[in-house]
Amino acid sequence: MDATTIFFYIFAAGAILSSVAVVVARIPLYSAIALILDFFFFAGLYVLLSAHFMAIIQILVYGGAIMVLFMFIIMLLNLREEHELITVRTHHAVAIILSMSLMVMMGTALNKIVDMNAVQAATVGTTEDTLVAVPSRVPGLYGALDEASLEQGFKSKVSKWSAGTAKSSDGKYRPVDPSAPTVVPTMLSGGTPEHPEPASFGTAEPMSLLLVNRFVVPFELTALMLLGAIVGAVVIAKKRL
Amino acid sequence: MITITHYLILAAITFFVGMAGVLVRRNAITVFMCIELMLNSVNLTFIAFSKYRIDLDGHVFAFFVMAVAAAEAAVGLALILHLFRHYRSVNVDSAHELRL
């Protein structure tokens, strides 16, 4: 058992326990604190998935901004302890049975995405930095991937596209034109004299380059949406609607 | 060896814990926090697929989901504040008439 496995099980147990605590806590403030804890466990899981940028954003946006808003409203309304969970009504039982059965259904379906036995068989005797593609229902899905092979796979994808030898199917990673006078910083800048090394997977650099290149329109629309949300929140929360 | 299936099943468990909370709880703020829980577990699915396909699109999508969750929290909490001023309670059963 390596460190990643141990940390995965620690974070997973913490995430499940704290999300159950969010649901069963009787005082809303305790629910909010459990939710903050839950967000931190999720951030840990994101780090295990090499999503370093998303882990930081998770803590800043969810654990910081959104939960401050929740705590502020809870304290502003000064809600007392409620006794709704003590009286088990019929629809509680129905809701719990419904969600548990859906969970079992989804779990059995997800269990078939990657064939565990194929992963075990494919990883036997391979070296550390070997990508192991296993038969799965999702095209292009790797069954087992460690940090080194993830980095290697990402860099080889980036360098292939930047050399123009292989174009991605939807053309989302444009090959860098060497004759162009100004080199637009794309994710493919690895290989040019200015950027000898491509950026690592999941760090801020490739994320920001994607956000201002391919996803620039939704990124700017997000700003408009946040403006609308701010104005809407102020208008709705006014004393006289 | 941790595979993508581990992450997907963890996301399913937390999603349905959040769903049970939405269905069971009557406190509007707790219901709202359970919705955040469900959004978060969907984000975990996006990021897990992103890693195991070596493709950053899932990270970008999770980023936009977080922006939507922030906007939704601001507007939703303003609505809850208004609900509390009107009914002196945040019980969702008190607001079943669809009028002020």
Image: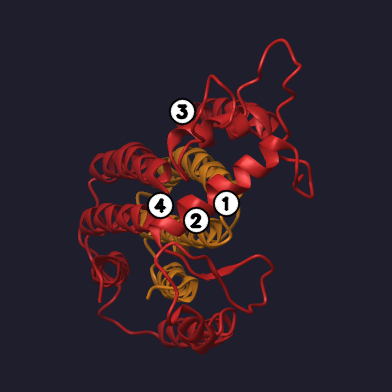
Chain colours: A red, B orange
Tell me what residue is drawn at x 45 percent, y 67 percent: B22
Tell me what residue is drawn at x 54 percent, y 57 percent: B46
Q: Choose mark 3 or mark 4, whichever is in front.
A: 4
Asked whether disc 4 touches disc 2, contact meaning CB atoms under 8 Å apart, the reply is no
How far apart marks 1 and 2 lie (CA) works out to: 5 Å
**Residue A23 located left or right of residue B4:** left
Asked whether disc 1 touches disc 2, contact meaning CB atoms under 8 Å apart, the reply is yes
User: At numbered mark 2, what does the secondary structure look like: helix, strand or loop?
Assistant: helix
Q: Nearer the viewer, residue A131 or B81?
A: A131
Q: Which residue is mark 3?
A: A238
Say yes or no: labels 1 and 3 on the same chain: no
First in sequence, mark 1 or 2: give its number: 2
Instruction: Specify the amino acid type for callout 4.
Output: Ser
Q: Nearer the viewer, residue A22 or B42?
A: B42
Q: Position of residue A217 (x, y in %)?
A: 70, 30
Which of the image's four quarters has the N terminus of chain B? bottom left
Q: Which residue is mark 4?
A: A50
User: At numbered mark 1, what does the secondary structure look like: helix, strand or loop?
Assistant: helix
First in sequence, mark 3 or 4: give its number: 4
Instruction: Specify the amino acid type for callout 2.
Output: Ile
Q: Which residue is mark 1?
A: B58
Quarter residue A165 falls in = top right
Instruction: Specify the amino acid type for callout 3.
Output: Lys
**Image mark 2: chain:** B
- Is A117 situated above or below A132? below
How far apart marks 1 and 3 lie (CA) works out to: 37 Å
How far apart marks 4 and 2 lie (CA) works out to: 9 Å
